[in-house]
Image (tube, rainbow, N blue to C red):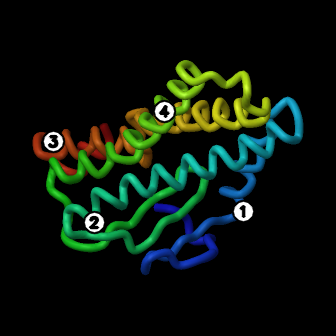
Amino acid sequence: MFGKHTTRISTLFGAQVETNLEGVVVLAAAGLLGRTWFEGGLIFVGLALATGLHVMGHWLVALASGKGISRIVFTRAGGIEYSGAEAGLAEGVLRDAAGPAVNGICALAGYLVLAWLDTSAWAPEGVVAVRIFAHCSLFLLALNLLPAIPLDGGSMLRSMLAPRLGEDRAHVW
């Protein structure tokens, strides 16, 4: 599912963390969206942080369900391999929704900080950093809710259709 050309970059709580050149290029290319090198760096860091928090949302639900994660792959679309027994419908949907939910919470928190706190005393770079992190989190929320495999929205849709259509037809839909 994630390609055969990934490289293990670390082990985190027993899970292999892998990426490939494609994943690094996509993250670096996102940084090119900044108007300055500083903004580009903030986009790179903000997207990486939002992605890490997204994965932690999935992981927390897996742990709460008595399962874990054996492999995390950071590529263009990413992927997670869960350990333990196959998830049921409710657990699968909840686990898939956890990552986008964390991104939604992060985006909302960032926008509320900017709207409600007096940021006039902040360094301008701090305000830009919070704004970019909120934007990156919102982007990941919207992207991952698209109903396309391997995104979370596609996985949730497949999980909900599988009991009625069967695994193969649900995957096609």
The residue identified by callout 3 is: 165
| Secondary structure category for the residue under label 2 | helix
Q: Is residue 65 above or below residue 173?
A: below
Q: CA distance from mark 1 to mark 2?
A: 30 Å
Q: Position of residue 130 (x, y in %)?
A: 64, 35
Q: Amino acid at mark 3?
A: Leu
Q: Amino acid at mark 4?
A: Ala
Q: On residue 86, which mark appears?
A: none
Q: Residues within 10 Å of mark 3 (few under 14, many from 20)?
A: few
Q: Nearer the viewer, residue 27 or 48?
A: 48
Q: Residues within 10 Å of mark 1 (few under 14, many from 20)?
A: some
Q: CA distance from mark 2 to mark 3?
A: 29 Å
Sequence-earlier tag: 3 or 1: 1
The residue identified by callout 1 is: 21
Sequence-earlier tag: 4 or 1: 1
Q: Amino acid at mark 2?
A: Leu
The residue identified by callout 4 is: 109
Q: Nearer the viewer, residue 126 or 100?
A: 126
Contact, CB < 8 Å: mark 4 with mark 2?
Answer: no
